[in-house]
Image (cartoon, rainbow, N blue to C red):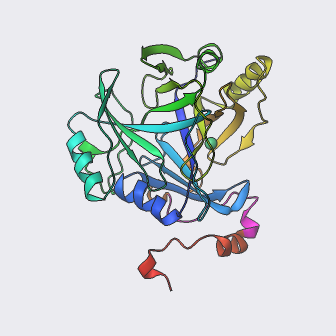
Amino acid sequence: MQPIQGLHHVTAMAGDPRANIDFYHTLLGQRLVKKTVNFDDPGTYHFYFADATGTPGTVLTFFPWPGARRGTPGNGEAAAVAYTIRPGSADFWRARLGAAGVVIGQSQTRFGQEVIPFRDPDGMAVELVVSDAPAAVQYWAEGPVPAEHALRGFHSVTLWLDEVERTAALLADQMGYTAAGQEGSRTRLAGASGDIGLYVDLLHRPGQPRGRFGVGSIHHVAFRTVDDDEQLAYQLALRAAGFDVTPVRDRQYFHSIYFRAPGGVLFEVATDAPGFLYDETAGALGSALRLPPWLEPRRAEIEAALPDLRQPEARP
Ligand code: ZN
């Protein structure tokens, strides 16, 4: 079995779908590479924001539930997602975010790298990490951010945990992660690809309350595996190690298995293939509502029930 390559995608819950698109697509310059519905609840949108082609390790996805209650961050969940930016881009992003009214937190230094923390419109913690590490991302040339400042895929996710040992052991013993540093209460592990979405940070917060899931909460963290055979090998090995792993689910753009990590965070192992070009050309990615074949017969009913995505001034 090959070690896990790194992060595949991160999925969170948003509130207003229009505000979600405005923030990630228009402000952060992440392409909306797929506009579909929650396959388990087709009355809800599922948005995928990524680089130009949806490269694994760049993909942040949201289920927008307008009017739902906000979550409260706490132990047992992923509490922050971090993107990499190039050295020299920090001032650009402070200015761009500031001009949009985003409140930027105090810059931090983490493992020798500058970290710029802020929150999205639903309160989810997002970070920019300054790094000159190589990143095989596909620049979205039609996007609003110049190439030299564009986000360069995920740097890391941070999990908040009551105790880190068992989650660290899962990552190291079952998933092929290696220890990449310890700084205060933060333990860093690295995936195998050496490229984007490399790190998982475990933040030790003993005795702190558990998170309450809601708008602005991260629902799960998905890890990359190379193909279906590898995924089945992981399913077998994780089950043998005592994890309650789901059957393979067809997510159209990748295949998924899910299981709960010891600290409470929902993990997914997803395949790189078939990818986001499965049902749209590169030029058309995200431009139309895509439905999987088993929901296509219900398209009219589904479209009628989904929230209006037009800008407020364009709504009737
Ligand atoms: Zn997922």
- The front one of 250 and 29 is 29
The answer to whether 280 is drawn above or below residue 273 in the figure is below
Residue 4 percent location from the top left of the image: 58, 23
Asked whether residue 266 is drawn in magenta, I would say: no
Q: Quadrant of residue 44?
A: bottom right
User: Which quarter holds ligand 1?
Assistant: top right
Q: Residue at x 57, y 37 (%)?
A: 74
Q: Residue furthest front?
A: 207
Say which of 177 and 254 sits in front: 177
- From which residue to which does the magenta span run? 286-298
Q: Position of residue 162 (x, y in %)?
A: 60, 25
Decide: is 205 above or below 19: above
Quadrant housing residue 125: top left
Q: Residue at x 25, y 47 (%)?
A: 94
Q: Is residue 266 above or below residue 27?
A: above
- Give the overall secondary structure of the magenta segment: loop
